[in-house]
């Protein structure tokens, strides 16, 4: 009897030890997963902040040159004015590449891994685009005008240099000049809705009209009118280069006062009236160009937040209630699978932007205030993380996703040539389009919507009008 009891105790002890071991291993696995996520968060946030900080520095440099430009014009030094404008063009177009470089260095300093397989795609994206710049952009100067002579080759070389440096971060809001916009084919939310068969998103987003449209019958994307290239494709500053329209001496005095209060030094003229040197330049002379904020980009945030139905406590502080240039970055991280030999790749996205206030004769105002006449000034002094849902960007904030970029650039144009039949089944996004273009499939979706549309309600907070977003952190 005693020996039997001893055997039972030993059995119970073994079971308890196994259970304890499993519990300990699961805790270790959870700890490693949380640590990996924290590493990705730290690296992603650091990358976005570093890039936004550099954006603010570039805006300050361009603003400072605006002041120097005014000084040169005041004394009639047109050659100096032209040199300043050309320097500003280089800063606005090539300068933001330093944002990507700074983001990459910050991510590496915060333990972003360099051995994640997906990171190779971040370098490939840059290398592929360098090839496009050298072939497509260079061969079509009317569609892709150079910011200055030889800019495309210089730009392509810089992209290849970045690709060779070993990228551990990807910029998710690159605005490629040759990118097309064709709803819903260039909306990632549309594809995720099909993959997950999330038909309430179809109803809430107001996309039910798509049920009656074949893909090849969608309106073809409009070609954008060529316009002077000012902003970089990567981490763009969203500026415009233009000759200010000053219709009256009063406007001129206001502009002079604005520049003077922000640090420009104007020599005194003889007599009571103080006007610049006699100007005999043509009205469209390039030395007349100043750099301004693009008012379509640099607008108030509050209406956007309201339309996006984002959770907001209180009101946005005036000094932060401004959209404009921002930096959105993606970091990949290996999530350890403690009891498995497989690797799971996690991602973290973060966005940040520079903020500032400008001095005017009436006091400090937000940089986009009308009192600044929209002119860029050295006014940026802070950077903040922002919700990804409020970040500006092209290609659905997914320009660090190689598979998505290949689909948008190479596969979507095929839809207009041969419909979904022209697409390959090897691409996950192409498979979604093939699925959607099947009349029988859409008929089943229509039946579901007809029966269940009334049960679909927008959840509170975190979802934007076009079907929601996973970029709210």
Image (cartoon, rainbow, N blue to C red):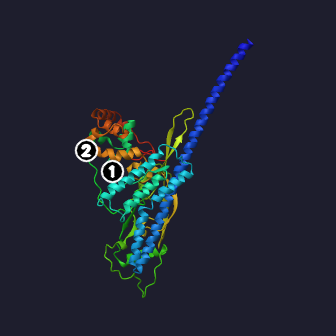
Say which residue label 2 marks.
417
Point out the image quarter for the N terminus.
top right
Q: Is residue 177 visible?
A: no
Q: Secondary structure at mark 2?
A: helix
In the rendered view, would you say 364 is above or below 353? below
Looking at the image, the residue that sits furthest to the bottom is: 271
Task: Tell me: 335 left or right of 17.
Answer: left
Q: Residues within 10 Å of mark 1 (few under 14, many from 20)?
A: some
Percent of width and height locating residue 69: 42, 74
Mark nearer the viewer, 1 or 2:
2
Comparing 32 with 356, the one in front is 32
**Looking at the image, is mark 1 or mark 2 earlier in the sequence?**
1
Q: CA distance from mark 1 to mark 2?
A: 16 Å
Q: Secondary structure at mark 1?
A: loop
Comparing 166 with 199, the one in front is 166
Say which residue label 1 marks.
181
Percent of width and height locating residue 227: 32, 62
What residue do we see at 28% from left, 53% from top?
Answer: 222
Percent of width and height locating residue 308: 42, 49
């Amino acid at each position: 009897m005693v020996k039997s009891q001893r055997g039972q105790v030993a059995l119970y002890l073994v079971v308890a030890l196994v259970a304890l071991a499993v519990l300990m291993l699961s805790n270790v696995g959870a700890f490693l997963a949380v640590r990996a996520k924290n590493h990705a968060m730290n690296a992603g946030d650091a990358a976005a902040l570093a890039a936004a900080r550099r954006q603010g520095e570039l805006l300050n440099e361009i603003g400072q040159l605006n002041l120097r430009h005014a000084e040169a014009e005041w004394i009639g030094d047109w050659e100096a004015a032209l040199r300043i404008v050309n320097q500003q063009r280089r800063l606005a177009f090539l300068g933001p590449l330093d944002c990507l470089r700074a983001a990459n260095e910050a991510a590496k300093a915060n333990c972003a891994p360099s051995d994640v397989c997906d990171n190779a795609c971040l370098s490939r994206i840059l290398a592929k685009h360098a090839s496009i710049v050298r072939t497509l952009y260079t061969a079509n100067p009317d569609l892709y005008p150079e910011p200055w002579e030889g800019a495309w080759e210089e730009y392509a070389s810089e992209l290849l240099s970045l690709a060779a440096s070993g990228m551990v971060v990807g910029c998710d809001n690159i605005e490629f000049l040759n990118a097309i916009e064709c709803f819903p084919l260039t909306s990632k939310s549309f594809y995720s809705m099909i993959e997950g068969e999330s038909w309430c998103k179809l109803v809430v987003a107001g996309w039910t009209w798509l049920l009656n449209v074949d893909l090849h019958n969608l309106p073809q994307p409009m070609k954008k009118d060529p316009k002077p290239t000012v902003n970089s494709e990567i981490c763009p500053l969203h500026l415009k280069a233009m000759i200010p329209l000053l219709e009256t001496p009063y406007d001129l005095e206001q502009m002079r006062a604005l520049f003077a209060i922000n640090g420009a030094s104007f020599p005194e003229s003889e007599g009571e009236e103080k006007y610049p040197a006699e100007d005999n330049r043509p009205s469209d002379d390039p030395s007349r160009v100043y750099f301004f904020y693009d008012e379509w980009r640099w607008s108030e945030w509050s209406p956007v937040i309201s339309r996006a139905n984002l959770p907001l406590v209180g009101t946005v502080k005036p000094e932060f209630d401004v959209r404009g240039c921002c930096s959105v970055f993606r970091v990949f991280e290996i999530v350890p699978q403690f009891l498995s030999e497989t690797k799971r790749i996690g991602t973290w996205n973060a966005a940040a932007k520079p903020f500032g206030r400008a001095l005017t004769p009436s006091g400090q105002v937000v940089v986009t205030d009308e009192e600044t006449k929209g002119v860029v000034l050295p006014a940026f002094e802070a950077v903040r993380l922002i919700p990804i849902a409020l970040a500006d960007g092209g290609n659905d904030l997914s320009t660090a996703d190689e598979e998505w970029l290949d689909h948008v650039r190479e596969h979507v144009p095929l839809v207009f040539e041969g419909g979904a039949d022209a697409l390959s089944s090897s691409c996950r996004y192409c498979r979604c389009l093939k699925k959607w273009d099947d009349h029988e499939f859409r008929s089943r979706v229509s039946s579901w919507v007809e029966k269940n549309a009334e049960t679909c309600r927008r959840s509170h907070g975190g979802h934007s009008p076009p079907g929601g977003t996973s970029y709210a952190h």
